[in-house]
Image: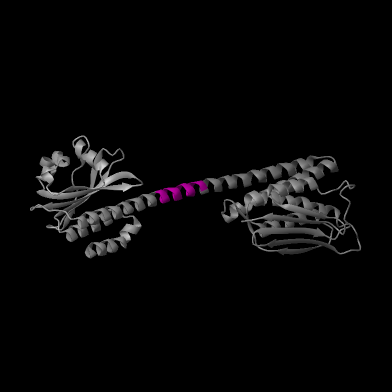
Amino acid sequence: MMKYIEVIEELSESKHLHQGDVLKFSKEVLKTAALTLNCERTNAWLFNKGRTVLKSIHSYSSSSNDFKREADLSNDDLPNYFNYLTKNRIIVSDNAMSEEMNTELVDTYLKPNKIRSMIDVPLRSEGEMIGVICFEAVGDEHHWTDEEKKFTQSLAQLFSIAIETNQKNLYRRELERTIKQKEVLLYEINHRVKNNMSVIIGLINLQRHKSKDDYHQKVLEELKEKIYSMAIVQNHLHNNKSLVKVELRRYLEELIENLHGSYGHGKEIKLQLGLERAVIDISKGIPIGLIANEVLTNSFKYAFHQQDKEHILKVQLNRNQDEIVLIFSDNGPGFDPGKTETGMGMELIQDLTEQISGQVLFNFEKGAKVEIRFPVE
């Protein structure tokens, strides 16, 4: 019994088994089995998809020490044998030519190959029969021992594992191809969205220049900045070849630079940025960009009108283990959100914060301060 255990342990460490290389592992199993059991022939067969035909993988002959492939075995020709395979975990034939289950094989397979005794073990995967592995003695009749039966069943289990590994590898490669195709598609979509947003911004600029009053020019300018805050996200996705992730620090730096260029003319504004690196999902990136645009636009527009005061705008970004804290603050005069007509769109900020499952705190006593906290993976 020990020699059988040692053979199983050796085969279980085969690289072909772990790689799912069915053809190479079948050669290993069949040759090793023939030498260990001292039988002339060993064969491995797999069913077609309809389980109507057994197709030979390899047939090994110990006397000639070579491999070949046998002709297909069809259910139409061997209905009785196929039925036995389906219903039994192992078929043992000490006298193969006299066994009822082999009657259809006598003239076409057993006599031509001089087979006197054999064991056939169905191969199964996830409860389904997928093939059969055969161990065939020629010449003298062989009485199969219990140890030999258990050994052949163990070989069949190893062979089934190799087949399952091969199938999993095929599924994995197919999944990788599908994911790659989706990545290419999403990348192209991001690219087109980025270009479309650039066109929209250009159209808004054109319309703003055609406007004949300050009110509509300001409305269009604010609309353009909101769209630009979303366009930055698409630009980052495109440039970084990322499909769904945005580096928030770089995103905020670009947004702040753009707003400073749009609204900071003629104002000495000291920017104090303390931004840690944080990567977030695009589903959070766009709402955060719109919040930042709303808060910063109001600071640039309304906080810095005092001539004898140093103007400071602070933005802090801190990444904790499972939370991001984003704080915007200026040292302007502040305002009463209940009375002022130039409030910063608090309802919009609150709605956007809820979209990212976050919390927002406002403080307008000494300048304006907005603190956003939201969870991250």
Q: Residue at x 81, y 40 (%)?
A: 211
Q: Is residue 292 visible?
A: no
Q: Residue at x 59, y 47 (%)?
A: 190
Tell me, yes or no, if residue 344 can be seen here: yes
- Colour treatment of the image: one colour
Specify whether residue 177 is painted magenta: yes
- The image shows residue 365, relative to residue 93, as above or below, that is below
Q: Is residue 1 left or right of residue 125?
A: left
Q: Left or right: where does residue 5 sit relative to residue 95?
A: right
Q: Position of residue 18 (x, y in %)?
A: 35, 58
Q: Principal SS element in the magenta part?
A: helix
- What residue range appears in magenta? 171-182
Asked if the stretch drawn in magenta spans residue 109, the answer is no
Res. 100 image quadrant: top left
Q: Indicate left or right for 84 with 288 as reference.
A: left
What x and y, as percent, mark residue 186? 55, 46
Relative to 370, 242 lies left or right = left
Q: Residue furthest top?
A: 76
How far across and down, in percent of the image, does residue 361 sit? 78, 54
Depth check: 33 or 194 in front?
A: 33
- The residue lying toward the viewer, choosing from 19 and 76, is 76
Residue at x-position 84% and y-position 42%? 215
Q: Which quadrant of the rendered structure holds the C terminus? A: bottom right
Q: Say which quadrant the N terminus sits in.
A: bottom left
Name which residue lies at 76% across and 59% down: 327
How many numbered circles does the render carry?
Answer: 0
Q: Residue furthest left?
A: 139
